[in-house]
Image: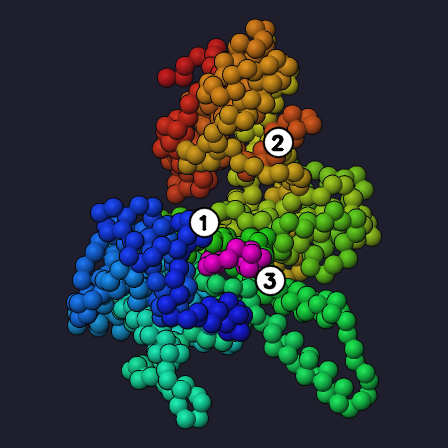
């Protein structure tokens, strides 16, 4: 936000000093000072007399403290005499302090927010030396030690960050430093979720982007550094008020008050806040320092209190040019208000789209490693742009989140710590995916991502972002009766396939790409839209001669996936048959299925032969009903109601927590879709003789055909280490064995369908 915009909102010229005040809608009229009551019997809070002074009023407006708060402080607050001026009383109430004259007129001398103070932490010689070593490793480009995360914090330093309307802090900027120190650094240090190799960079966002802290380890020294910025911001605020209140000198200019001890890097808020340069800087730094740290989490946290003002300079230049052309009399330039307004809108739109592109590029490049958190302070209306940036990051495979906390230190701190928590969650997910056990780490493939929300229904592939494979460069294999057999392409007219180079989806294990079968011209799409899936990792196993064999492990990866799907499909068929056999089960009860998948072997000119898993693209709302870690979707009351209203009988007691379904129609059994999904997981365990549990149920529920189309399930196998000589579990990395089965049943509550579908099996135990 520009300084000018802020000034526009600054308090109007102060009224004469002894302006008597009462709050709006308060007492019935002015009360004379003599009639003011004492603290023992004050009457209504709003009727308490209070006189404003110039200074008191200014402070009150700056800190956004309503008059009523001060009246309440006089009535209910702690009362103490001012230490140096015996005629003044300090009232302390709800984190605010008000200094008021003791006489009956009660002049408000000043008001302040009691602020939080932060102490520097003690650093021992040992800790200092340890820090220097860590800093050396981080900045050494040849170091082999990988970073755990790289966080780039972008802090707005525009003029409006000087506003002192945050409760608990002198200024907005102060609140930001406080939150970073306590809720980003200290919070993670104390929880043990951050250490030296969690690298932090801080960028100051003004009209340009200034790197204030460059690649610092997360430790007590970083905390101290931010605490110093916090203290600076308090000092900067004092300086600002001294200068504004300074007496006018002979030249008519205000004389500057005593200057504080300016440290290098002293941050004085002011000027515009341009998002562009800072986002560009963040993008460049993430890119520049990514070598050798490809498994680390990346985090960009943007803290701002207004919309970007990047467009202001562009508009200024445009105006200058127009003036010049007017002077030259080359053309007479007259624009209506409407035209000018449209022009401004147009420029602002372009600025926003440039910013979005920067975030899209970061998300596209780094995918699920990329965490983007935007925190907007203040007025909700100003944050359209921040919201757009967040959805861009999400669309391109990043993990992004937008928050607008209230204007208090506590709420801003909570927003920052929630950003820190999602960074930690991302790190945990990345770690669990890359660790194979011991010191071994899987390497993540580098790949760009595209917008997942805008998948086209193509009829022709002409785009050079697709790789085309024709004729003998394509082979399709299906898993039938326990082995893979070569089959024709899906569509009778297909002679080749097109595989997109950019991924549109990314799970913990796999990347998803657009995939089409093509006619013999090599460009016309035949058949439906498909999805090709590949491992997120550079799979590497050794062949029988001990050589690292990429091909072997990729082949294993796709085959394991297809086998797993086939196992789940058999179970789904059995489940549907079981449902058919239940008398009285409502005819609309959903059935389950796993979408067909097969393997395509493709021969690339330079990559050589490789395999992808291909399945039909699911259109519709993608949902998850349970996962492989015990989480299960809860059946909501809404779901239950929908079923309850099916028999077209009035449900008169809507507030009743438990709806007795049997009461509606004695002949039919109704279950919700979610209950079908959970019962299927339970069924899979019993059906397999308590050996396998199929979970991680996700995909699309087709409302028309009442059919679940699941994809990518996980199977927990009771004896996880059955496959001999392999360090892998039977059903891949998502197979958590007996522990996974236990987790499922710990959180599973049997629904009405469970009992019906699990009956009639011989207990395998
Ligand atoms: Zn159950």
> What residue is rendered at 34% in x and 57% in y?
32
Q: Residues within 10 Å of mark 2 (few under 14, many from 20)?
A: many
Magenta stretch, residue numbers: 367-387
Q: Circle 3: is it few (<14), some (14-19), or many (20+) Cα within 10 Å?
A: many
Position of 281 relative to 61 (above/below) = below
The secondary structure type at the circle numbered 2 is strand
Name the N-terminal-most of marks 1 and 2: 1
Q: Is residue 124 left or right of residue 595?
A: left
79 sits to left or right of 537: left
Instruction: Answer left or right for 450 relative to 751.
Output: right
**Residue at which label 3 appears:** 356
Give the foreground label among 1 and 3. Answer: 1
Which residue is denoted by mark 2 in the rendering? 701
Q: Can residue 78 be seen at all in this image of the molecule?
A: yes
The mark that comes first in sequence, 1 or 3, is: 1
Image quarter where the C terminus lies is top left
How far apart in space, not on screen, are marks 2 and 3 (Cα)?
32 Å
Query: Which of the 4 image quadrants contains residue 343?
Result: bottom right
Q: Residue at x 24, y 62 (%)?
A: 103
Instruction: Specify the quadrant of the image occupied by residue 226.
Output: bottom left
Please give the residue where the numbered disc 1 appears in the rendered image.
25
- x, y percent for residue 246: 37, 82
Residue, x 74% and y 70% (percent of image)? Answer: 337
Residue placed most toward the observer, 291 or 182: 182
Q: Is residue 448 magenta?
A: no
């Amino acid at each position: 936000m520009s300084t000018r915009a802020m000034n526009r909102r600054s308090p109007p010229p102060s009224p004469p000093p002894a302006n008597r005040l009462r709050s709006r809608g308060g007492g019935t009229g002015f009360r004379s000072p003599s009639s003011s009551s004492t603290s023992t019997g004050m009457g209504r809070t709003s009727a308490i007399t209070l006189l404003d002074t110039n200074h008191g009023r200014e402070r009150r407006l700056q800190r956004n403290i309503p008059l009523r708060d001060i009246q309440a402080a006089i009535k209910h607050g702690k009362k103490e005499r001012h230490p140096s001026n015996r005629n003044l009383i300090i009232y302390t109430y709800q984190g605010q302090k008000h200094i008021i004259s003791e006489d009956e007129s009660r002049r408000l001398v000043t008001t302040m927010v009691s602020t939080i103070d932060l102490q520097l932490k003690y650093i021992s010689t040992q800790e200092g030396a340890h820090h220097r070593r860590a800093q050396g490793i981080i900045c050494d480009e040849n170091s082999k030690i990988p970073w755990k995360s790289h966080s780039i914090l972008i802090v707005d330093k525009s003029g409006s960050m000087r506003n002192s309307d945050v409760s608990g802090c002198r200024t907005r900027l102060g609140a930001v430093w406080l939150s970073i120190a306590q809720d980003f650094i200290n919070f993670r240090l104390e929880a043990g979720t951050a250490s030296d190799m969690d690298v932090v960079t801080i960028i100051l966002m003004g009209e340009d982007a200034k790197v204030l802290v460059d690649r610092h380890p997360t430790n007590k020294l970083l905390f101290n550094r931010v605490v110093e910025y916090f203290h600076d911001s308090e000092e900067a605020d004092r300086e600002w008020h001294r200068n504004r209140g300074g007496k006018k000198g002979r030249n008519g200019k205000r004389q500057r008050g005593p200057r504080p001890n300016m440290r290098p890097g002293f941050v004085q808020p002011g000027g515009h806040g341009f998002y562009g340069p800072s986002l560009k800087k963040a993008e460049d730094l993430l890119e520049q320092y990514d070598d050798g740290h490809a498994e680390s989490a990346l985090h960009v946290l943007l803290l701002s209190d207004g919309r970007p003002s990047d467009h202001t300079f562009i508009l200024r230049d445009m105006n200058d040019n127009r003036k010049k052309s007017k002077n030259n009399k080359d053309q007479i330039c007259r624009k209506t208000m409407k035209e000018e307004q449209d022009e401004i809108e147009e420029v602002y739109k372009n600025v926003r789209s440039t910013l979005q592109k920067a975030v899209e590029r970061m998300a596209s490049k780094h995918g699920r490693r990329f965490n983007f958190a935007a925190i907007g302070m203040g007025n909700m209306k100003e944050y359209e742009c921040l919201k757009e940036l967040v959805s861009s990051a999400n669309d391109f495979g990043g993990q992004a989140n937008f928050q607008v906390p209230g204007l208090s230190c506590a709420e801003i701190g909570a927003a920052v710590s929630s950003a820190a928590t999602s960074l930690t969650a991302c790190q945990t997910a990345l770690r669990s995916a890359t660790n194979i056990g011991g010191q071994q780490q899987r390497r993540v493939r580098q790949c760009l991502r595209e917008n997942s929300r805008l998948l086209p229904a193509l009829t022709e592939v002409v785009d050079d972002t697709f790789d085309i494979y024709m004729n003998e460069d394509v082979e399709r294999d299906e898993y039938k009766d326990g082995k893979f057999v070569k089959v024709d392409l899906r569509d009778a007219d297909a002679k080749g396939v097109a595989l997109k180079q950019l991924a549109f989806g990314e799970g913990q294990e796999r990347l998803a790409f657009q995939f089409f079968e093509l006619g013999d011209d090599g460009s016309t799409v035949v058949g439906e839209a498909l999805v090709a899936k590949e491992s997120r990792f550079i799979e590497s196993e050794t062949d029988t001669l001990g050589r690292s064999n990429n091909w072997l492990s990729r082949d294993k990866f796709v085959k394991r996936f297809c086998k797993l799907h086939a196992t789940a499909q058999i179970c789904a068929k059995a489940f549907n048959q079981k449902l058919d056999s239940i008398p009285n089960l409502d005819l609309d009860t959903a059935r389950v299925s796993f979408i067909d998948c097969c393997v395509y072997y493709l021969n690339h000119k330079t990559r050589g032969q490789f395999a992808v898993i291909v399945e039909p693209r699911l259109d519709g709302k993608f949902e998850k009903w349970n996962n492989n870690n015990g989480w299960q979707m809860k059946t909501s009351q809404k779901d239950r109601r929908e079923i309850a209203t099916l028999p077209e009988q009035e449900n008169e007691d809507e507030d009743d927590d438990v709806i007795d379904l049997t009461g509606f129609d004695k002949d039919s059994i109704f279950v919700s879709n979610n209950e079908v999904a959970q019962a299927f997981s339970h069924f899979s365990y019993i059906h397999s003789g308590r050996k396998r549990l199929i979970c991680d149920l996700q995909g699309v529920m087709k409302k028309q055909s009442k059919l679940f189309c699941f994809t990518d399930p996980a199977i927990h196998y009771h004896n996880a280490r059955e496959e001999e000589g392999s360090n892998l579990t039977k059903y891949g990395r998502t197979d958590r064995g007996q522990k996974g089965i236990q987790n499922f049943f710990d959180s599973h509550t049997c629904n009405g369908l469970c009992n019906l579908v699990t009956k009639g099996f011989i207990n395998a135990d």
